[in-house]
Image: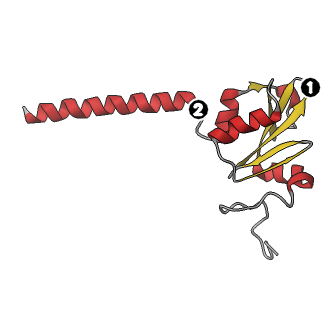
Amino acid sequence: MTYRRWFVVGTAFAILGVLVVTIAVSSGSFSPRGFVEDHYQRAAAHDLGSEALAYSSTKQPSQVAQEITDAWQPADQYIDSTGVYLRYNDDSVVIRPVAAGSLILLERLTTAYPRYYSHVGSHWGWGQGNTVRGGGPGSGK
């Protein structure tokens, strides 16, 4: 009888685990990238090549930035008249004002940093082991 009880308890925990994982995966918001993909409208016509995927919102950039930073705290952020620039470990989220609200550009950090250097060059730090520089001789000098 004891083995049967443990089997029933083990099966119940396994089913509960599967349900938790299924719910978590269906939400898709495991990263800033997933959050943007899940919460904003895709605007492929505004993509910047294949590197920066565009999304849109009817909300102002400050509101969009607040929603994203409430869900995912950025490693750095910079705000100027051209938009809100959020830096994460692997991704950047750039929120720009447009007439109908906001254009949200989601891009890997390695291509975003050179693209937005004129805005964030002296503002985005590189904590948490991130770097855009190569690893060859003299790197970091």
Q: Nearer the viewer, mark 1 or mark 2?
A: 1
Single out the residue that lies furthest toward the left.
1
The correct choice, above or below, for 25 with respect to 140 in the image is above
Q: Amino acid at mark 2?
A: Gly
What residue do we see at 69% from left, 31% from top? 37
Question: Quarter-wise, where is residue 49 in the image?
Answer: top right
Quarter the N terminus occupies: top left
The correct choice, above or below, for 66 with respect to 136 in the image is above
Disc 1: CA contacts within 10 A as few (<14), some (14-19) or many (>=20): few
**Location of residue 86 in the rendering, given as x and y in whole percent from the top left corner:** 76, 46
**Side of 73 where 54 appears, left or right:** right
What residue do we see at 79% from left, 64% from top? 133
**Side of 63 where 80 appears, left or right:** right
Disc 2: CA contacts within 10 A as few (<14), some (14-19) or many (>=20): some
**Location of residue 47 in the rendering, given as x and y in whole percent from the top left corner:** 85, 33
* 14, 67: nearer the viewer: 67
Mark 1 → mark 2, Cα distance in angstroms: 29 Å
Circles 1 and 2, Cβ within 8 Å, touching? The answer is no
Q: To which residue does mark 2 refer?
A: 28
N-terminal of the pair, mark 1 or mark 2, is: 2
The number of numbered discs placed on residues in the rendered structure image is 2
**Location of residue 76 in the rendering, given as x and y in whole percent from the top left corner:** 74, 53
Colouring used for the render: secondary structure
Q: To which residue does mark 1 refer?
A: 99
Q: Amino acid at mark 1?
A: Ala
Kindly state the secondary structure of the residue where label 1 is placed: loop
What residue do we see at 30% from left, 33% from top? 13
Quarter the C terminus occupies: bottom right
Kindly state the secondary structure of the residue where label 2 is placed: loop
The correct choice, above or below, for 110 with respect to 134 in the image is above
